[in-house]
Amino acid sequence: MGPSRQQLHDAIAEVASKNGAVESRLFNGVSVHKMSQSVSFEQLKAILVAVKQNDVRTFVGTLQGEMVVSVNFNFESIDAKDTGRHAGKKRGRDAHEEAVKAAIDRVKRGVHSEEIDAPALESASSALYSILTTLRGAKNETAVESWGLSYKKDENGVSKAQHPRLVLSLRMSPSVAVPLKTIFRVLGPNCRSDGMLTVQDSESLADGLKMPLSEQAAAAETHGQKSLTLFATVSVADRC
């Protein structure tokens, strides 16, 4: 006989407390962890490791204006339809592909040609397309409200790699629980190493990059809910 849900929760809570969680509780078969305002990818990955075989039941979202990571022991996944089903099946160019290409082109226009790192742009393009075509909520809700791709230089004008840092930004729907494992999967190996999730004001953190909400999501925010924003630095190194 395996560990009880309480034992599983206690083990997860111990790890979560060291990785951004400020409060943990087990409620109706759900291990709930209220997080600090901003949590790094490294911290979220540590929690994913702690949940072990329950990684497909682990979600991140917002509740009452706060970031929450939850492990729903009652959740049954719907086959393997959450990710990867569109991979390698693009036929011609679609609206998502057009939007991603336009974002890449805007970045190219904003930097000198010698500063552009082609592999990083390709990684960003692949990640964005995967996000737009496969990332959904636990109940198949729309998860992505808006997104962007920008570049940022260090204070001395260039990054350590002598290239501007590409930053992928993603604003998610308030109160929608998104599979945490899926987020890292669709980001791909070059966009999931350095980043964070936050409930702080996204525009102030994104150097003025506008990431609007839908009318429904904006209404939710007026009632105290908050959207979750992801920032990921695109790396050319193949690391996880």
Image (spheres, rainbow, N blue to C red):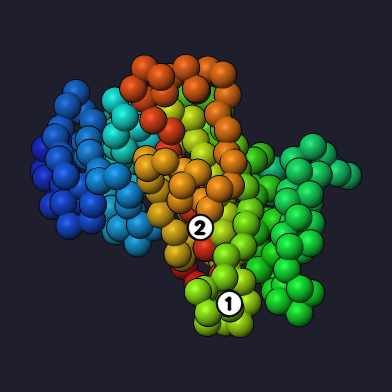
Image coordinates for residue 204, horizontal then vertical, percent: 46, 47
Total labels: the figure holds 2
Position in image of residue 168 (x %, y %): 57, 54
For label 1, the crowd category at 10 Å Cα-Cα, with few meaning under 14, some 14 to 19 and many 20 or more, is: few
- Give residue 80's quadrant in the image: top right
Closer-to-camera residue (28/145): 145
* Residue visible at 76% across and 79% down in the picture: 114
Judging by the rendered image, the residue that carries numbered circle 2 is 232
The amino acid on which the numbered mark 2 sits, given as a three-letter code, is Ala
Q: Give the mark, 1 or 2, whose residue is nearer the N terminus.
A: 1
The residue under the point 55% across, 29% down is: 213
Q: Are circles 1 and 2 on residues that touch, CB within 8 Å? A: no
Q: Amino acid at mark 1?
A: Gly
In the image, 156: left or right of 19?
right
Q: Quadrant of residue 25?
A: top left
Residue 223 x %, y %:
36, 17
Is 215 located above or below residue 50 in the figure? above
The residue that mark 1 highlights is 157
Would residue 1 be seen by someone viewing this image from the given angle?
A: no
For label 2, the SS is strand
Q: Is residue 150 left or right of residue 67?
A: right
